[in-house]
Image (cartoon, rainbow, N blue to C red):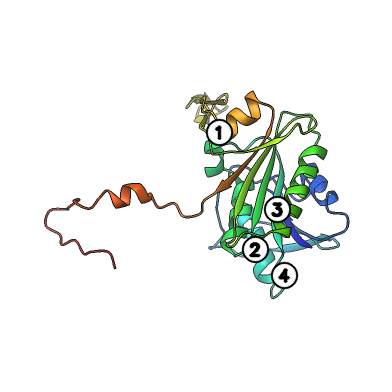
Amino acid sequence: MRVLLSNDDGVHAPGLAALAAAFPHDEVWVVAPDREQSATSHAISLHRPLRIVQVGERWFSVDGAPTDAIYLAVNHLLRGRPPDLVLSGVNHGPNLGNDVLYSGTVAAAMEGALLGVTAIAVSLAARAPFDFGAAAGFAAGLARSVAADPPATPTLFNVNVPAGPVKGYRLTRLGVRTYGNEVVEKQDPRGRSYFWIGGDASHGDIPGSDCNTVFDDGLVAVTPLHLDLTHDALLSGLGDFEIPGYRKEPAP
């Protein structure tokens, strides 16, 4: 199996090394940012050149975002021989609920799915010091199951593994995770204001969600994500919606 690995914690991150080690008998390619790119979401570098540096056998760093790394890997380094799967992680911390909208880890996997390759984002929902072995092992097991029975269309799985040995897993939906909406204002030595945003994370109590599964039940959460963001229910309910002064055309 040819697997492409990336992350948002940087090409030398321990979580990435643990994930690579979980595929000892496979053709592993690593293409990852040259430094930490956490919370970069789906940023892509369209207005500056990118540089690729080989740091080991089939192991490359890119001076860009996680999305850049996957784009270059699939369309350049592996052009004409795409990977069977893209895996991103193991992230140093959780990516649950709303986190998927900000996460560079999830964005790297999402770019793989957009480019036609089924992808898995895997995160260790724990605090330092991290032990990535169980999360990497679970991700590899999931990857083999998916490869053995691939979905009809490229699919994106978001996986969060709690600390410690894996007790089991659950197929989940996204929960709601917030960071307190705090803004802390401080001043630098020259008297100019600067700001820190965000606070302590908390999650809503939603049964069956990834947040509840990980934090309350201590199970791995496996969440399939939909790349089409169209609000179908709302779209179908807007039949009588009108904008005065403009002609509304029917759907084709």
Which residue is under mark 2? 50
Query: Which one is in front in this view, the residue at disc 1 or the one at disc 4?
Result: 1
Amino acid under disc 3 = Leu
Front position in the image: 49 or 201: 201
Residue 27 vertical position relative to residue 103 in the rendered view, above or below: below
Mark identifier at residue 87? 3
Mark identifier at residue 209? 1
Query: Which one is in front in this view, the residue at disc 3 or the one at disc 4?
Result: 3
In the image, farthest residue toward the bottom: 80
Q: Could you tell me which residue is drawn at 18 percent across and 51 percent down?
A: 240
Q: Could you tell me which residue is drawn at 77 percent across and 48 percent down?
A: 141
User: Which label's residue is closer to the chain start, 1 or 4?
Assistant: 4
In percent of width and height, residue 20 lies at 81, 51
Front position in the image: 100 or 194: 100
Q: Could you tell me which residue is drawn at 73 percent across and 48 percent down?
A: 142
Could you classify mark 1 by the number of other residues whose Cα lies within 10 Å: few (under 14), some (14-19), or many (20 or more)? many
Which residue is under mark 4? 78
In the image, farthest residue toward the left: 245
Mark identifier at residue 132? none
C-alpha span from label 3 to label 1:
22 Å
Q: Secondary structure at mark 3?
A: strand
Q: Secondary structure at mark 2?
A: loop
Amino acid under disc 4 = Leu
